[in-house]
Image (cartoon, rainbow, N blue to C red):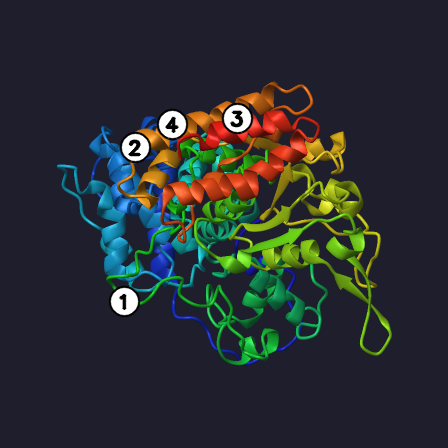
Amino acid sequence: MTTDSTAITPIDLPPIPCSHRPSEEPVRVAAAMLLHAARYGGSVLTDRDVWTDANIDTLISHFVNQPDVSGKSFDDKLDIQLDGVSDDVRLLFAEIYLLQMLPTMQFHKATKIKNATSALRNAGIDYQIPAEIDEAFDHPVFWGGVAFAVRRFQQLSVLIEFVRYLRTFPETEIAAAYDDPFAWRTMVNNAPGTSEPSLRSCLTFLGHPKFFMSIVAGHHKKQIVEAFFPAVTGCVSTGDVDVDLAKIRYWLQEEPGDTPDFYHGPLESIWRPDEVADIDDVPAVTTDPDDDRRESSYTVESIIEDGAFHSASELRDIITRWHETRNIVLQGAPGTGKTWLARRLAFALIGDRIDDAVRSVQFHPGTSYEDFVRGWRPGGDGTLTLVDGPLLEHAERARQYPDIPHVIVIEEFNRGNPAQALGEMLTLLERSKRNPADALELTYMRDTELAVFLPENLYVVGTMNTADRSLALVDFALRRRFAFFDLEPQFNDAWKQCLRARFRGVDADLIDELAVRITAMNDQITADMSLGPSFRIGHAYFTPGLEATDLATWFTAVVRSSVEPQLREYWHDDPATVNDVVDSLLSGI
Protein backbone atom coordinates (compact mmCIF):
# COMPACT_ATOMS: atom_id res chain seq x y z
CA MET A 1 0.00 0.00 0.00
CA THR A 2 1.36 3.45 -0.86
CA THR A 3 1.12 6.57 1.22
CA ASP A 4 -0.91 8.69 -1.20
CA SER A 5 -4.65 9.24 -1.05
CA THR A 6 -5.39 6.79 -3.86
CA ALA A 7 -4.92 3.98 -1.32
CA ILE A 8 -7.74 5.31 0.85
CA THR A 9 -11.45 5.19 0.07
CA PRO A 10 -12.35 8.90 0.03
CA ILE A 11 -14.96 10.55 2.20
CA ASP A 12 -17.63 11.75 -0.22
CA LEU A 13 -18.63 14.91 1.64
CA PRO A 14 -17.45 18.52 1.42
CA PRO A 15 -14.57 19.04 3.91
CA ILE A 16 -15.50 20.81 7.08
CA PRO A 17 -13.62 23.99 8.09
CA CYS A 18 -10.64 23.31 10.35
CA SER A 19 -7.20 24.53 11.32
CA HIS A 20 -4.00 22.67 10.42
CA ARG A 21 -0.86 21.93 12.41
CA PRO A 22 2.33 23.84 11.55
CA SER A 23 4.44 22.10 8.94
CA GLU A 24 5.84 18.76 10.09
CA GLU A 25 8.35 18.71 7.23
CA PRO A 26 11.44 19.40 9.40
CA VAL A 27 10.67 16.35 11.56
CA ARG A 28 9.95 14.24 8.47
CA VAL A 29 13.30 15.16 6.90
CA ALA A 30 15.29 14.51 10.10
CA ALA A 31 13.51 11.20 10.74
CA ALA A 32 14.24 10.06 7.19
CA MET A 33 17.96 10.74 7.75
CA LEU A 34 18.08 8.66 10.92
CA LEU A 35 16.00 5.81 9.51
CA HIS A 36 18.17 5.77 6.39
CA ALA A 37 21.18 5.21 8.67
CA ALA A 38 19.29 2.47 10.52
CA ARG A 39 18.73 0.70 7.21
CA TYR A 40 21.98 1.27 5.31
CA GLY A 41 24.48 2.27 8.01
CA GLY A 42 26.47 5.47 8.26
CA SER A 43 26.00 8.32 10.73
CA VAL A 44 24.26 11.68 11.00
CA LEU A 45 26.81 13.10 13.45
CA THR A 46 30.06 12.13 11.70
CA ASP A 47 31.35 10.73 8.42
CA ARG A 48 31.94 7.29 9.98
CA ASP A 49 29.77 4.19 9.79
CA VAL A 50 28.44 3.69 13.32
CA TRP A 51 25.14 1.92 12.56
CA THR A 52 26.79 -1.51 12.35
CA ASP A 53 25.52 -4.85 13.61
CA ALA A 54 28.50 -5.12 15.97
CA ASN A 55 27.80 -1.72 17.54
CA ILE A 56 24.10 -2.53 17.90
CA ASP A 57 24.96 -5.81 19.65
CA THR A 58 27.26 -3.91 22.00
CA LEU A 59 24.42 -1.57 22.97
CA ILE A 60 22.19 -4.57 23.57
CA SER A 61 24.71 -6.12 25.96
CA HIS A 62 25.84 -2.93 27.71
CA PHE A 63 22.61 -0.94 27.86
CA VAL A 64 19.49 -3.02 27.17
CA ASN A 65 20.63 -6.08 29.13
CA GLN A 66 22.22 -4.11 31.97
CA PRO A 67 19.57 -1.79 33.40
CA ASP A 68 21.00 0.38 36.16
CA VAL A 69 18.50 0.30 39.01
CA SER A 70 20.34 2.78 41.22
CA GLY A 71 19.03 6.20 42.10
CA LYS A 72 21.72 7.97 40.06
CA SER A 73 20.87 10.38 37.27
CA PHE A 74 20.31 8.98 33.80
CA ASP A 75 23.63 10.45 32.61
CA ASP A 76 25.57 8.98 35.53
CA LYS A 77 23.99 5.58 34.94
CA LEU A 78 24.77 5.87 31.24
CA ASP A 79 28.45 6.47 32.04
CA ILE A 80 28.50 3.17 33.92
CA GLN A 81 26.59 1.26 31.25
CA LEU A 82 28.76 2.52 28.39
CA ASP A 83 32.03 2.22 30.26
CA GLY A 84 34.63 0.62 28.00
CA VAL A 85 32.67 0.79 24.74
CA SER A 86 34.13 2.35 21.62
CA ASP A 87 33.49 5.92 20.51
CA ASP A 88 31.46 4.58 17.58
CA VAL A 89 29.09 2.80 19.97
CA ARG A 90 28.65 6.07 21.87
CA LEU A 91 27.87 7.85 18.60
CA LEU A 92 25.29 5.21 17.73
CA PHE A 93 23.60 5.60 21.12
CA ALA A 94 23.53 9.39 20.69
CA GLU A 95 21.83 9.06 17.30
CA ILE A 96 19.23 6.62 18.63
CA TYR A 97 18.63 9.09 21.45
CA LEU A 98 18.09 11.83 18.84
CA LEU A 99 15.46 9.64 17.18
CA GLN A 100 13.65 9.05 20.49
CA MET A 101 13.32 12.77 21.29
CA LEU A 102 12.98 14.09 17.74
CA PRO A 103 9.24 14.93 17.52
CA THR A 104 8.34 15.54 21.19
CA MET A 105 7.46 18.93 22.66
CA GLN A 106 8.12 18.37 26.35
CA PHE A 107 11.89 18.81 26.18
CA HIS A 108 13.61 22.04 25.21
CA LYS A 109 15.82 22.01 22.15
CA ALA A 110 18.94 22.64 24.22
CA THR A 111 18.00 19.79 26.53
CA LYS A 112 17.43 17.41 23.63
CA ILE A 113 20.90 18.16 22.27
CA LYS A 114 22.46 17.88 25.72
CA ASN A 115 20.66 14.58 26.37
CA ALA A 116 21.63 13.01 23.06
CA THR A 117 25.26 14.01 23.34
CA SER A 118 25.56 12.93 26.99
CA ALA A 119 26.92 9.62 25.74
CA LEU A 120 29.76 11.51 24.02
CA ARG A 121 31.03 13.56 26.94
CA ASN A 122 33.79 11.04 27.68
CA ALA A 123 34.64 10.42 24.03
CA GLY A 124 37.46 12.17 22.19
CA ILE A 125 35.69 12.58 18.86
CA ASP A 126 34.42 15.41 16.72
CA TYR A 127 30.73 15.50 15.86
CA GLN A 128 28.14 18.01 14.73
CA ILE A 129 24.36 18.12 15.01
CA PRO A 130 23.10 18.34 11.40
CA ALA A 131 21.16 21.42 10.40
CA GLU A 132 18.15 19.23 9.55
CA ILE A 133 17.95 17.78 13.07
CA ASP A 134 18.58 21.20 14.60
CA GLU A 135 15.63 22.57 12.63
CA ALA A 136 13.44 19.59 13.59
CA PHE A 137 14.13 20.34 17.23
CA ASP A 138 12.71 23.82 16.58
CA HIS A 139 9.48 22.30 15.22
CA PRO A 140 8.29 19.44 17.51
CA VAL A 141 4.92 17.95 16.62
CA PHE A 142 3.34 16.35 19.73
CA TRP A 143 3.44 15.97 23.47
CA GLY A 144 4.84 12.52 24.14
CA GLY A 145 2.90 11.96 27.35
CA VAL A 146 4.26 10.95 30.72
CA ALA A 147 5.98 7.83 29.39
CA PHE A 148 8.57 9.88 27.49
CA ALA A 149 9.64 11.34 30.83
CA VAL A 150 9.54 8.37 33.18
CA ARG A 151 10.28 5.42 30.84
CA ARG A 152 13.29 6.73 28.96
CA PHE A 153 15.39 3.61 29.52
CA GLN A 154 12.59 1.31 28.30
CA GLN A 155 11.91 3.45 25.22
CA LEU A 156 15.57 3.65 24.20
CA SER A 157 15.87 -0.10 24.74
CA VAL A 158 12.94 -0.72 22.39
CA LEU A 159 14.55 1.50 19.72
CA ILE A 160 17.85 -0.37 20.00
CA GLU A 161 16.05 -3.72 19.83
CA PHE A 162 14.06 -2.49 16.81
CA VAL A 163 17.17 -1.65 14.81
CA ARG A 164 18.61 -5.11 15.45
CA TYR A 165 15.23 -6.69 14.59
CA LEU A 166 14.97 -4.65 11.37
CA ARG A 167 18.32 -5.99 10.19
CA THR A 168 17.26 -9.62 10.58
CA PHE A 169 14.98 -9.27 7.54
CA PRO A 170 16.07 -9.69 3.92
CA GLU A 171 16.47 -6.45 2.00
CA THR A 172 13.27 -7.08 0.04
CA GLU A 173 11.19 -7.08 3.24
CA ILE A 174 13.01 -4.05 4.62
CA ALA A 175 12.36 -2.20 1.37
CA ALA A 176 8.69 -3.17 1.56
CA ALA A 177 8.45 -1.79 5.10
CA TYR A 178 10.07 1.51 4.08
CA ASP A 179 7.60 1.75 1.16
CA ASP A 180 4.43 0.36 2.76
CA PRO A 181 3.07 2.02 5.93
CA PHE A 182 1.32 -1.13 7.10
CA ALA A 183 4.34 -3.36 6.62
CA TRP A 184 6.29 -0.77 8.60
CA ARG A 185 3.70 -0.66 11.37
CA THR A 186 3.73 -4.45 11.63
CA MET A 187 7.50 -4.52 11.86
CA VAL A 188 7.53 -1.83 14.56
CA ASN A 189 4.84 -3.53 16.65
CA ASN A 190 6.40 -6.99 16.35
CA ALA A 191 9.88 -5.88 17.38
CA PRO A 192 11.02 -7.31 20.75
CA GLY A 193 11.05 -5.36 24.00
CA THR A 194 8.52 -3.96 26.43
CA SER A 195 5.23 -2.74 24.98
CA GLU A 196 5.85 1.07 25.10
CA PRO A 197 2.85 1.84 22.86
CA SER A 198 3.49 5.59 22.60
CA LEU A 199 7.09 5.06 21.57
CA ARG A 200 6.06 2.44 19.00
CA SER A 201 3.31 4.75 17.74
CA CYS A 202 5.91 7.53 17.49
CA LEU A 203 8.27 5.29 15.50
CA THR A 204 5.38 4.21 13.27
CA PHE A 205 4.63 7.87 12.53
CA LEU A 206 8.28 8.72 11.87
CA GLY A 207 8.55 5.93 9.32
CA HIS A 208 5.56 7.14 7.26
CA PRO A 209 4.70 10.65 8.51
CA LYS A 210 2.54 11.54 5.50
CA PHE A 211 0.26 8.58 6.19
CA PHE A 212 0.21 8.06 9.97
CA MET A 213 -0.99 10.96 12.08
CA SER A 214 1.29 12.60 14.62
CA ILE A 215 -0.88 11.37 17.51
CA VAL A 216 0.66 8.82 19.85
CA ALA A 217 -2.05 8.46 22.50
CA GLY A 218 -4.03 5.39 21.49
CA HIS A 219 -7.16 6.42 23.38
CA HIS A 220 -7.13 9.79 21.62
CA LYS A 221 -7.07 8.05 18.25
CA LYS A 222 -10.00 5.89 19.30
CA GLN A 223 -12.00 8.86 20.62
CA ILE A 224 -11.44 10.81 17.40
CA VAL A 225 -12.51 7.92 15.19
CA GLU A 226 -15.60 7.21 17.30
CA ALA A 227 -16.62 10.86 17.09
CA PHE A 228 -16.09 11.19 13.31
CA PHE A 229 -17.35 7.81 12.10
CA PRO A 230 -20.12 7.84 11.01
CA ALA A 231 -21.55 11.01 12.56
CA VAL A 232 -19.30 13.53 10.80
CA THR A 233 -17.90 11.64 7.83
CA GLY A 234 -20.99 9.69 6.83
CA CYS A 235 -18.75 6.60 6.59
CA VAL A 236 -18.56 3.46 8.66
CA SER A 237 -15.30 2.96 10.49
CA THR A 238 -12.92 0.48 8.86
CA GLY A 239 -11.96 -0.93 12.27
CA ASP A 240 -8.39 0.33 11.86
CA VAL A 241 -7.89 3.67 13.61
CA ASP A 242 -4.86 4.57 11.50
CA VAL A 243 -6.77 4.03 8.25
CA ASP A 244 -9.71 6.04 9.56
CA LEU A 245 -7.43 8.90 10.64
CA ALA A 246 -5.74 8.82 7.23
CA LYS A 247 -9.17 9.11 5.58
CA ILE A 248 -9.91 12.20 7.68
CA ARG A 249 -6.48 13.62 6.86
CA TYR A 250 -6.91 13.23 3.08
CA TRP A 251 -10.42 14.62 3.34
CA LEU A 252 -9.37 17.78 5.20
CA GLN A 253 -5.85 18.50 3.93
CA GLU A 254 -5.33 21.63 1.84
CA GLU A 255 -1.95 20.49 0.50
CA PRO A 256 -0.49 16.95 0.40
CA GLY A 257 0.95 16.12 3.79
CA ASP A 258 -1.05 18.70 5.73
CA THR A 259 -2.02 17.62 9.22
CA PRO A 260 -5.47 18.63 10.50
CA ASP A 261 -5.25 19.96 14.07
CA PHE A 262 -7.34 17.76 16.33
CA TYR A 263 -6.18 19.51 19.50
CA HIS A 264 -7.49 22.99 18.79
CA GLY A 265 -10.40 24.67 17.10
CA PRO A 266 -13.32 23.01 15.33
CA LEU A 267 -11.93 19.47 15.25
CA GLU A 268 -11.25 19.32 18.98
CA SER A 269 -14.80 20.50 19.69
CA ILE A 270 -16.10 17.44 17.79
CA TRP A 271 -14.23 14.67 19.60
CA ARG A 272 -13.67 16.42 22.92
CA PRO A 273 -16.47 18.95 23.32
CA ASP A 274 -15.84 19.52 27.02
CA GLU A 275 -12.19 20.44 26.34
CA VAL A 276 -10.94 18.34 29.23
CA ALA A 277 -7.18 17.81 29.07
CA ASP A 278 -5.66 14.60 30.32
CA ILE A 279 -2.31 13.09 31.16
CA ASP A 280 -1.25 12.91 27.49
CA ASP A 281 -1.97 16.56 26.69
CA VAL A 282 0.38 18.24 29.13
CA PRO A 283 4.14 18.25 29.53
CA ALA A 284 5.37 15.33 31.58
CA VAL A 285 8.08 17.66 32.88
CA THR A 286 8.28 21.31 33.85
CA THR A 287 9.17 23.88 31.22
CA ASP A 288 12.09 25.10 33.31
CA PRO A 289 15.21 24.24 31.26
CA ASP A 290 17.05 23.19 34.40
CA ASP A 291 14.36 20.72 35.38
CA ASP A 292 13.10 19.22 32.14
CA ARG A 293 15.40 16.19 32.29
CA ARG A 294 13.31 14.50 34.93
CA GLU A 295 14.46 10.98 35.71
CA SER A 296 12.39 7.97 36.57
CA SER A 297 11.92 8.69 40.23
CA TYR A 298 11.35 5.21 41.63
CA THR A 299 13.66 2.24 41.09
CA VAL A 300 14.76 -0.92 42.86
CA GLU A 301 17.30 1.25 44.65
CA SER A 302 14.40 3.37 45.91
CA ILE A 303 12.82 0.29 47.49
CA ILE A 304 16.04 -0.40 49.37
CA GLU A 305 16.29 3.25 50.41
CA ASP A 306 12.74 2.98 51.75
CA GLY A 307 13.90 0.22 54.07
CA ALA A 308 13.79 -3.09 52.23
CA PHE A 309 16.25 -5.70 53.49
CA HIS A 310 16.15 -7.70 50.26
CA SER A 311 18.99 -7.48 47.76
CA ALA A 312 18.71 -5.40 44.60
CA SER A 313 19.24 -8.51 42.48
CA GLU A 314 16.38 -10.35 44.19
CA LEU A 315 14.02 -7.42 43.67
CA ARG A 316 15.13 -7.01 40.06
CA ASP A 317 14.46 -10.71 39.40
CA ILE A 318 10.91 -10.31 40.68
CA ILE A 319 10.24 -7.29 38.46
CA THR A 320 11.79 -8.97 35.41
CA ARG A 321 9.58 -12.03 35.83
CA TRP A 322 6.57 -9.79 36.49
CA HIS A 323 7.11 -8.13 33.10
CA GLU A 324 7.03 -11.57 31.52
CA THR A 325 3.97 -13.04 33.27
CA ARG A 326 1.98 -9.90 34.20
CA ASN A 327 0.82 -11.75 37.34
CA ILE A 328 2.82 -12.62 40.47
CA VAL A 329 2.21 -13.68 44.05
CA LEU A 330 4.41 -12.75 47.00
CA GLN A 331 4.08 -15.49 49.59
CA GLY A 332 5.76 -16.09 52.88
CA ALA A 333 5.62 -16.42 56.62
CA PRO A 334 3.99 -13.76 58.80
CA GLY A 335 6.00 -10.56 58.96
CA THR A 336 8.07 -10.97 55.80
CA GLY A 337 6.91 -7.63 54.41
CA LYS A 338 4.64 -8.85 51.63
CA THR A 339 2.18 -5.96 51.79
CA TRP A 340 4.90 -3.37 52.29
CA LEU A 341 6.91 -4.68 49.38
CA ALA A 342 4.05 -5.21 46.91
CA ARG A 343 3.21 -1.53 46.47
CA ARG A 344 6.86 -0.50 46.20
CA LEU A 345 7.53 -3.16 43.60
CA ALA A 346 4.58 -1.69 41.70
CA PHE A 347 6.16 1.77 41.71
CA ALA A 348 9.49 0.32 40.58
CA LEU A 349 7.71 -1.56 37.78
CA ILE A 350 6.09 1.70 36.66
CA GLY A 351 9.29 3.70 37.13
CA ASP A 352 7.64 6.42 39.16
CA ARG A 353 5.32 6.99 42.11
CA ILE A 354 2.04 7.31 40.21
CA ASP A 355 -0.48 6.57 42.94
CA ASP A 356 -3.49 6.43 40.61
CA ALA A 357 -1.80 3.63 38.66
CA VAL A 358 -1.76 1.35 41.72
CA ARG A 359 -4.95 0.10 43.35
CA SER A 360 -5.16 -2.18 46.39
CA VAL A 361 -7.97 -4.52 47.42
CA GLN A 362 -8.19 -7.24 50.04
CA PHE A 363 -9.82 -10.62 49.63
CA HIS A 364 -11.82 -12.11 52.50
CA PRO A 365 -14.08 -15.16 52.82
CA GLY A 366 -17.03 -13.16 51.54
CA THR A 367 -15.32 -11.74 48.44
CA SER A 368 -17.29 -12.71 45.35
CA TYR A 369 -17.04 -12.28 41.61
CA GLU A 370 -19.70 -9.58 41.91
CA ASP A 371 -17.48 -7.68 44.35
CA PHE A 372 -14.24 -7.95 42.42
CA VAL A 373 -15.15 -8.14 38.72
CA ARG A 374 -18.74 -7.04 38.01
CA GLY A 375 -22.17 -7.45 39.53
CA TRP A 376 -25.61 -6.01 40.06
CA ARG A 377 -25.90 -3.38 42.80
CA PRO A 378 -29.03 -1.68 44.17
CA GLY A 379 -29.25 2.04 43.48
CA GLY A 380 -30.77 4.75 45.62
CA ASP A 381 -34.04 4.40 43.75
CA GLY A 382 -34.21 0.65 44.37
CA THR A 383 -33.29 -0.34 40.83
CA LEU A 384 -30.39 -2.67 40.09
CA THR A 385 -27.36 -1.35 38.18
CA LEU A 386 -24.58 -3.37 36.64
CA VAL A 387 -21.41 -2.06 38.29
CA ASP A 388 -17.78 -2.85 37.49
CA GLY A 389 -15.63 -3.98 40.38
CA PRO A 390 -12.03 -2.93 41.11
CA LEU A 391 -10.50 -5.25 38.51
CA LEU A 392 -12.49 -3.99 35.51
CA GLU A 393 -12.33 -0.39 36.73
CA HIS A 394 -8.55 -0.49 36.95
CA ALA A 395 -8.34 -2.35 33.64
CA GLU A 396 -10.26 0.48 31.99
CA ARG A 397 -7.89 3.06 33.48
CA ALA A 398 -4.94 1.02 32.21
CA ARG A 399 -6.55 0.97 28.77
CA GLN A 400 -6.83 4.76 28.81
CA TYR A 401 -3.11 5.19 29.58
CA PRO A 402 -1.44 2.26 27.80
CA ASP A 403 2.13 3.53 28.23
CA ILE A 404 1.99 3.33 32.01
CA PRO A 405 1.90 -0.06 33.76
CA HIS A 406 -1.13 -0.25 36.06
CA VAL A 407 -1.05 -2.53 39.07
CA ILE A 408 -3.79 -4.05 41.16
CA VAL A 409 -2.58 -5.37 44.52
CA ILE A 410 -4.68 -8.17 46.00
CA GLU A 411 -3.97 -8.50 49.70
CA GLU A 412 -4.60 -11.85 51.38
CA PHE A 413 -5.04 -13.43 47.95
CA ASN A 414 -6.02 -16.84 49.35
CA ARG A 415 -8.14 -15.61 52.27
CA GLY A 416 -11.15 -15.72 49.99
CA ASN A 417 -11.71 -18.13 47.11
CA PRO A 418 -9.54 -16.77 44.26
CA ALA A 419 -11.08 -18.97 41.56
CA GLN A 420 -14.58 -17.92 42.56
CA ALA A 421 -13.71 -14.21 42.79
CA LEU A 422 -11.93 -14.21 39.43
CA GLY A 423 -14.35 -16.29 37.37
CA GLU A 424 -13.48 -16.10 33.68
CA MET A 425 -10.82 -13.52 34.57
CA LEU A 426 -8.67 -16.51 35.47
CA THR A 427 -8.31 -17.09 31.74
CA LEU A 428 -8.23 -13.43 30.70
CA LEU A 429 -5.41 -12.64 33.13
CA GLU A 430 -3.09 -14.98 31.26
CA ARG A 431 -0.48 -13.02 29.32
CA SER A 432 -1.15 -14.83 26.03
CA LYS A 433 -4.91 -14.15 26.25
CA ARG A 434 -4.73 -10.36 26.45
CA ASN A 435 -5.92 -9.61 22.95
CA PRO A 436 -9.23 -9.24 21.08
CA ALA A 437 -8.94 -12.70 19.52
CA ASP A 438 -9.09 -14.36 22.95
CA ALA A 439 -11.79 -12.11 24.42
CA LEU A 440 -14.56 -13.83 26.39
CA GLU A 441 -18.13 -13.07 27.36
CA LEU A 442 -18.40 -12.21 31.04
CA THR A 443 -20.90 -13.59 33.50
CA TYR A 444 -22.70 -10.25 33.34
CA MET A 445 -22.56 -8.46 29.99
CA ARG A 446 -23.68 -4.98 29.01
CA ASP A 447 -25.90 -4.56 25.97
CA THR A 448 -23.14 -2.85 23.99
CA GLU A 449 -20.48 -5.47 24.77
CA LEU A 450 -19.58 -8.45 22.64
CA ALA A 451 -16.60 -9.82 24.55
CA VAL A 452 -13.93 -8.58 26.93
CA PHE A 453 -10.16 -8.86 27.20
CA LEU A 454 -7.68 -7.29 29.61
CA PRO A 455 -5.04 -4.76 28.50
CA GLU A 456 -1.37 -5.66 28.26
CA ASN A 457 -0.35 -3.00 30.77
CA LEU A 458 -2.47 -4.36 33.64
CA TYR A 459 -0.32 -6.14 36.22
CA VAL A 460 -1.51 -8.13 39.24
CA VAL A 461 0.35 -8.87 42.46
CA GLY A 462 -1.19 -10.97 45.20
CA THR A 463 0.11 -11.49 48.72
CA MET A 464 -0.34 -14.79 50.57
CA ASN A 465 0.35 -15.76 54.16
CA THR A 466 1.61 -19.34 53.95
CA ALA A 467 1.19 -20.00 57.69
CA ASP A 468 -2.60 -19.73 57.86
CA ARG A 469 -3.94 -23.21 57.14
CA SER A 470 -7.52 -21.98 57.26
CA LEU A 471 -7.03 -20.18 53.97
CA ALA A 472 -8.17 -21.50 50.61
CA LEU A 473 -5.76 -23.52 48.56
CA VAL A 474 -4.71 -22.08 45.24
CA ASP A 475 -5.61 -24.46 42.42
CA PHE A 476 -3.25 -25.48 39.65
CA ALA A 477 -5.04 -23.47 36.96
CA LEU A 478 -4.39 -20.30 38.92
CA ARG A 479 -0.82 -21.26 39.79
CA ARG A 480 -0.05 -21.69 36.09
CA ARG A 481 -0.98 -18.08 35.41
CA PHE A 482 1.01 -16.54 38.27
CA ALA A 483 4.68 -16.54 39.16
CA PHE A 484 5.21 -17.22 42.88
CA PHE A 485 7.99 -15.70 44.96
CA ASP A 486 8.83 -16.80 48.51
CA LEU A 487 9.82 -13.93 50.78
CA GLU A 488 12.23 -15.06 53.47
CA PRO A 489 12.73 -13.50 56.91
CA GLN A 490 15.61 -11.05 56.49
CA PHE A 491 17.78 -10.77 59.60
CA ASN A 492 20.81 -9.82 57.54
CA ASP A 493 23.31 -6.96 57.53
CA ALA A 494 20.72 -4.55 56.14
CA TRP A 495 18.38 -5.37 59.04
CA LYS A 496 21.19 -4.95 61.55
CA GLN A 497 22.11 -1.60 60.05
CA CYS A 498 18.50 -0.48 60.44
CA LEU A 499 18.65 -1.26 64.16
CA ARG A 500 22.01 0.46 64.57
CA ALA A 501 20.63 3.58 62.89
CA ARG A 502 17.51 3.54 65.05
CA PHE A 503 19.30 2.82 68.35
CA ARG A 504 22.47 4.82 68.02
CA GLY A 505 25.14 4.04 70.56
CA VAL A 506 23.97 0.49 71.20
CA ASP A 507 26.73 -2.11 71.13
CA ALA A 508 26.81 -3.67 67.64
CA ASP A 509 27.55 -7.06 69.21
CA LEU A 510 24.17 -6.98 70.97
CA ILE A 511 22.36 -6.47 67.66
CA ASP A 512 24.36 -9.32 66.14
CA GLU A 513 23.33 -11.48 69.09
CA LEU A 514 19.65 -10.62 68.61
CA ALA A 515 19.90 -11.77 64.99
CA VAL A 516 21.41 -15.05 66.15
CA ARG A 517 18.63 -15.60 68.71
CA ILE A 518 15.81 -14.81 66.28
CA THR A 519 17.35 -17.10 63.68
CA ALA A 520 17.65 -19.88 66.26
CA MET A 521 13.94 -19.46 67.08
CA ASN A 522 13.04 -19.70 63.40
CA ASP A 523 15.24 -22.75 62.97
CA GLN A 524 13.36 -24.43 65.82
CA ILE A 525 10.02 -23.57 64.19
CA THR A 526 11.25 -24.94 60.86
CA ALA A 527 12.40 -28.19 62.44
CA ASP A 528 9.01 -28.82 64.07
CA MET A 529 7.14 -31.35 61.90
CA SER A 530 3.80 -29.77 62.78
CA LEU A 531 4.95 -26.32 61.70
CA GLY A 532 7.76 -25.80 59.18
CA PRO A 533 9.34 -22.78 57.44
CA SER A 534 5.99 -21.18 56.61
CA PHE A 535 5.51 -20.46 60.32
CA ARG A 536 8.74 -18.56 60.93
CA ILE A 537 8.56 -15.07 62.40
CA GLY A 538 9.44 -12.43 59.82
CA HIS A 539 11.59 -9.33 60.09
CA ALA A 540 8.60 -6.96 60.12
CA TYR A 541 7.97 -8.01 63.74
CA PHE A 542 11.48 -6.90 64.65
CA THR A 543 11.80 -3.70 62.63
CA PRO A 544 11.48 -0.63 64.87
CA GLY A 545 9.30 2.34 64.03
CA LEU A 546 10.04 5.97 64.77
CA GLU A 547 8.49 5.73 68.23
CA ALA A 548 11.08 3.18 69.41
CA THR A 549 13.81 4.97 71.37
CA ASP A 550 15.36 2.28 73.59
CA LEU A 551 16.35 -1.09 72.15
CA ALA A 552 15.81 -3.17 75.31
CA THR A 553 12.37 -1.68 76.01
CA TRP A 554 11.27 -2.00 72.38
CA PHE A 555 12.59 -5.54 71.87
CA THR A 556 11.04 -6.80 75.10
CA ALA A 557 7.67 -5.30 74.17
CA VAL A 558 7.79 -6.93 70.72
CA VAL A 559 8.58 -10.33 72.14
CA ARG A 560 5.98 -10.17 74.94
CA SER A 561 3.09 -8.62 73.01
CA SER A 562 3.56 -9.94 69.45
CA VAL A 563 5.92 -12.89 69.24
CA GLU A 564 5.02 -14.79 72.42
CA PRO A 565 1.25 -14.88 71.64
CA GLN A 566 2.10 -16.21 68.17
CA LEU A 567 4.32 -18.91 69.63
CA ARG A 568 1.62 -19.95 72.10
CA GLU A 569 -0.68 -20.49 69.12
CA TYR A 570 1.99 -22.64 67.49
CA TRP A 571 2.80 -24.71 70.57
CA HIS A 572 -0.55 -24.49 72.31
CA ASP A 573 0.01 -27.89 73.92
CA ASP A 574 3.65 -27.28 74.85
CA PRO A 575 3.95 -24.15 77.04
CA ALA A 576 7.38 -25.22 78.26
CA THR A 577 8.84 -24.87 74.76
CA VAL A 578 7.30 -21.41 74.42
CA ASN A 579 8.79 -20.35 77.75
CA ASP A 580 12.22 -21.63 76.72
CA VAL A 581 12.17 -19.77 73.40
CA VAL A 582 10.98 -16.53 74.98
CA ASP A 583 13.60 -16.78 77.72
CA SER A 584 16.29 -17.33 75.08
CA LEU A 585 15.17 -14.25 73.19
CA LEU A 586 15.09 -12.00 76.24
CA SER A 587 18.04 -13.34 78.23
CA GLY A 588 20.21 -10.49 79.41
CA ILE A 589 18.18 -7.81 77.61
Disc 4 secondary structure class: helix
Q: At which x and y percent is residue 430? A: 68, 39
Crowd band around label 3 with a 10 angstrom C-alpha radius: few (<14), some (14–19), many (20+): some
Q: Position of residue 77 (x, y in %)?
A: 29, 40
Measured along the vertical axis of the image, is residue 181 above or below residue 568? below
**Residue 513 marker:** 4
Q: Which percent across, then down, holds residue 258?
A: 46, 67
**Distance CA(mark 2)–CA(mark 4):** 9 Å
Q: Mark 2 = which residue?
A: 508
Classify mark 3: helix, strand or loop: helix
Q: Is residue 381 visible?
A: yes
C-alpha span from label 2 to label 1: 47 Å
Quick check: 514 left or right of 116? Answer: right
Instruction: Of the two numbered discs 3 and 4 on the same chain, state the one appearing first in sequence.
Output: 4
Looking at the image, do the residues carrying marks 1 and 4 touch, with CB atoms under 8 Å apart? Answer: no
Disc 1: CA contacts within 10 A as few (<14), some (14-19) or many (>=20) = few
| Camera-nearest label, 1 or 4 | 4
Q: Nearer the observer, disc 1 or disc 3?
A: 3
Circles 2 and 4 in contact, beta carbons < 8 Å: no
Q: Earlier in the sequence, mark 2 or mark 1?
A: 1
Q: Amino acid at mark 3?
A: Met
